[in-house]
Image: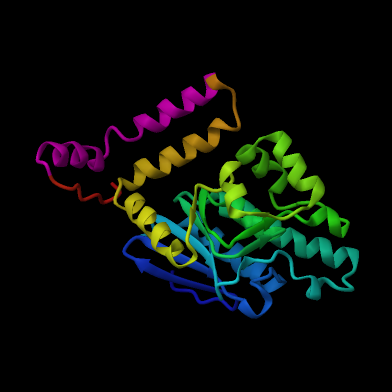
């Protein structure tokens, strides 16, 4: 990625691993209009062309917050029309994030409230620091989750737990998020990024086309019935057969060496 952003740090962490840092630490990385525009531009660009990226890591700057949700100071006094126009940017940014073909791992290093929690849920999976806190607080502010929260949370934790979280607006910790299936691992704060990077590295070493097709097939599993899901899976599988990476994988296995995948 050659672009620079006002509210994001986007940098190659390692070969084939892109690190995206929400960068408004003075405001707990809250989502203002500019961050919404920056995220929308970033994710749309990666949908159209992920380039060399095989895995993406998303985290927050400053160490205290992943993302505190919508910037309520900016929203204070907004007209209804301005609010809806701003929210359209946020929702489209999250939708495009979920369309990115390569895996996105959340490194939740602090508070993930409101829209920040929805960003965490839009990741393919996430690890959290032990000090991280989560909440969908929208109903306490006269609104409701509107960037995928009511759809992604039940898929992660089940309908009954999701209703409890959303309808109370109550915050909960990383251990609870792990027990409920919302995050995949709880890490000591100082070890979070190392753990996420180790997993990202493992993904980036695998065959890129295989990873993308497998990700899409799993996503489809939540959207269609079993018969159509199986049909999609085998279509995705057959995409692998004529690839050079499939041949390289088998060759490397038999030669007892690590494969060198090219994405072809």
Magenta span contains residue 20: no
Q: Is residue 186 left or right of residue 7?
A: left
Q: Is residue 224 above or below residue 119?
A: above
Q: Residue at x 35, y 57 (%)?
A: 198
Q: Is residue 202 left or right of residue 247?
A: right
Residue 96: tell me if it is visible: no
Residue 20: tell me if it is visible: yes
Q: Residue at x 50, y 47 (%)?
A: 184
Percent coordinates x, y for residue 46 in the rendering: 49, 58
Q: Residue at x 51, y 77 (%)?
A: 4
Percent coordinates x, y for residue 217 in the rendering: 47, 35
Q: Is residue 40 left or right of residue 264?
A: right
Q: Nearer the viewer, residue 172 or 153?
A: 172
Image quarter of residue 44:
bottom right
Quarter containing the N terminus: bottom left
Magenta span contains residue 233: yes
Percent coordinates x, y for residue 103 in the rendering: 45, 50
Q: Residue at x 81, y 51 (%)?
A: 144
Which residues make up the magenta segment? 227-256
Q: Is residue 198 left or right of residue 70?
A: left
Percent coordinates x, y for residue 80 in the rendering: 89, 63
């Amino acid at each position: 990625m050659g672009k620079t952003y006002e509210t994001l740090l986007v940098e190659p962490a390692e070969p084939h691993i892109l690190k995206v840092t929400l960068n408004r630490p003075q405001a707990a990385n809250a989502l203002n209009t500019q961050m919404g525009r920056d995220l929308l531009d970033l994710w749309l660009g990666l949908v159209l062309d992920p380039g060399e990226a095989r895995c993406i890591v998303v985290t927050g700057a400053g160490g205290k917050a992943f993302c505190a949700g919508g910037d309520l100071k900016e929203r204070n006094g907004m007209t209804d029309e301005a609010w809806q126009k701003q929210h359209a940017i946020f929702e489209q940014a999250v939708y495009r994030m979920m369309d990115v073909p390569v895996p996105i791992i959340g490194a939740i290093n602090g508070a993930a409230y409101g829209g920040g929690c929805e960003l965490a849920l839009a990741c393919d999976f996430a690890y959290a620091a032990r000090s991280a806190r989560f909440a969908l607080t929208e109903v306490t502010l006269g609104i409701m989750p509107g960037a995928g929260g009511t759809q992604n949370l039940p898929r992660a934790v089940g309908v009954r737990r999701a209703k409890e979280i959303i309808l109370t607006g109550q915050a909960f910790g990383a251990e609870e998020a792990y027990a409920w299936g919302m995050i995949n691992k709880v890490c000591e704060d100082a070890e979070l990024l190392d753990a996420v990077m180790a997993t990202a590295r493992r993904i980036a070493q695998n065959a890129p086309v295989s990873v993308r097709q497998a990700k899409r097939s799993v996503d489809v599993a939540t959207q269609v019935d079993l018969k159509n899901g199986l049909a999609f899976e085998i279509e995705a599988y057959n995409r692998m057969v004529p690839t050079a990476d499939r041949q390289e994988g088998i060759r490397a296995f038999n030669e007892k060496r690590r494969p060198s995948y090219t994405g072809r």
